Amino acid sequence: MRQFIDSHDLAGEIRMERSLDPRAILIVEGATDARLFERFVDHEHCYVLAAHDRERAVSVLRILNALPLSGVLAIVDADFGRITGTLETDSNLLFCDGHDLEIMLIQSQALDRLVAEHASANKLAAFLANRKPQMLMASLLVHSCLPLGALLMISLRLGLTLKFDDLTFRDFVNSNNLQIDVTSLVRSVLNKSSCHDRNLETQLLQELHTILSEKTIQIWNLARGHDCIELLAFALRAAIGTKKSKTSDRKSISVNSELLERELRLTFSEADFATTLLIQGIHEWEFANSDYRVLSK
């Protein structure tokens, strides 16, 4: 029920627990993040707590810092902060590589293992061979999803209330090459948002063109992991797979983004985690807070 507790109450609960439990505390955004990081922490010396959203995770950390309460580390998504220069500055706050946790997972070999499990080997080989220049699947997904990330960033900057949940990818994605038609994307988002302002459509298209034509575009910080996984699910139902995938016991299952996100987290290994910038940041935090340990040795 912690998701219904405000930041001050949650911070108070953590402070009370510290009087009984001297371990380091790792605060993360949500329950799925907690399940991932719990695989890598040293449970004898650290426990993981889900704040249930990014804003609350940062707010709770700030309250605990002000007490002060030592041995508390928070890990959250960067979102668009690296692009906009608005990342919070706090010695007890770290950010996932790229835009979010899912992008960090996509950058690892976990994605290759996931795709190999669900894709048709022949379809995948033919699909990648036709890409010019050829790209790894991770790069292909991220490049394809840049318009989605850019449109959301524009929407947030302009204070719009555009809706991006439950978009129908076939309305704006070419099933043969997984490229997004930007005009169709903007119209899909506007329709989903019950907005039919043609002037706004023109403005959004112009701003999208400006962002996507930048030579220094930060692809891993602009694309959202959820969009990339949704696109992968779309691809596995057509371009590189079939409508059904096979489980280890050869039963047919429907491929969807929820399934893929869960399997991607499960496939992400200690070896994958060891290659991230995030783990370097955790080691540096442990060095600066030598009385506490987060990671298994």
Image (cartoon, grey):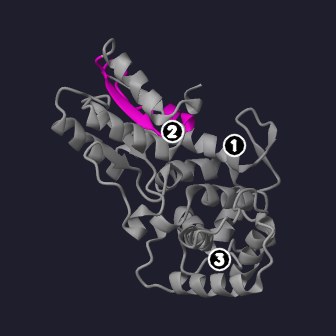
- Which residue lies under the disc numbered 1? 259
Q: Nearer the viewer, mark 1 or mark 2?
A: 2
Distance from the alpha carbon under mark 2 to that under mark 3? 36 Å
The quarter of the displayed image where residue 22 is located: top left
In the rendered image, residue 24, in percent from the top left (x then y), is placed at: 30, 26
The quarter of the displayed image where residue 231 is located: bottom right
Q: What is the three-letter code of the residue carrying label 3?
A: Asn
Q: Nearer the viewer, mark 1 or mark 3?
A: 1
Residue at x 63%, y 60% (from the top left corner): 227
29 is within the stretch colored magenta: yes
In the rendered image, residue 55, in percent from the top left (x then y), is placed at: 48, 46
Residue at x 61%, y 41% (from the top left corner): 263
Tag 3, which secondary structure? Answer: loop
- Which residue lies under the disc numbered 2? 33
Residue 269 shows in the view: yes
Q: Say which label, 2 or 3, has the lower sequence index.
A: 2
Tag 1, which secondary structure? Answer: helix
Q: What is the three-letter code of the residue carrying label 2?
A: Asp
Question: Magenta span covers which residues?
Answer: 22-45
Residue 172 shows in the view: no
In the rendered image, residue 210, in percent from the top left (x then y), is placed at: 53, 86
Q: What is the three-letter code of the residue carrying label 1?
A: Leu
Distance from the alpha carbon under mark 1 to that under mark 2? 15 Å
In the rendered image, residue 33, in percent from the top left (x then y), is placed at: 51, 38
> Which mark, by number, is residue 130?
3
Within 10 Å of the Cα at label 2, are there few (<14), some (14-19), or many (20+) other Cα atoms? Answer: many
Tag 2, which secondary structure? Answer: helix
> Which mark, by number, is residue 56?
none
Within 10 Å of the Cα at label 1, are there few (<14), some (14-19), or many (20+) other Cα atoms? Answer: few
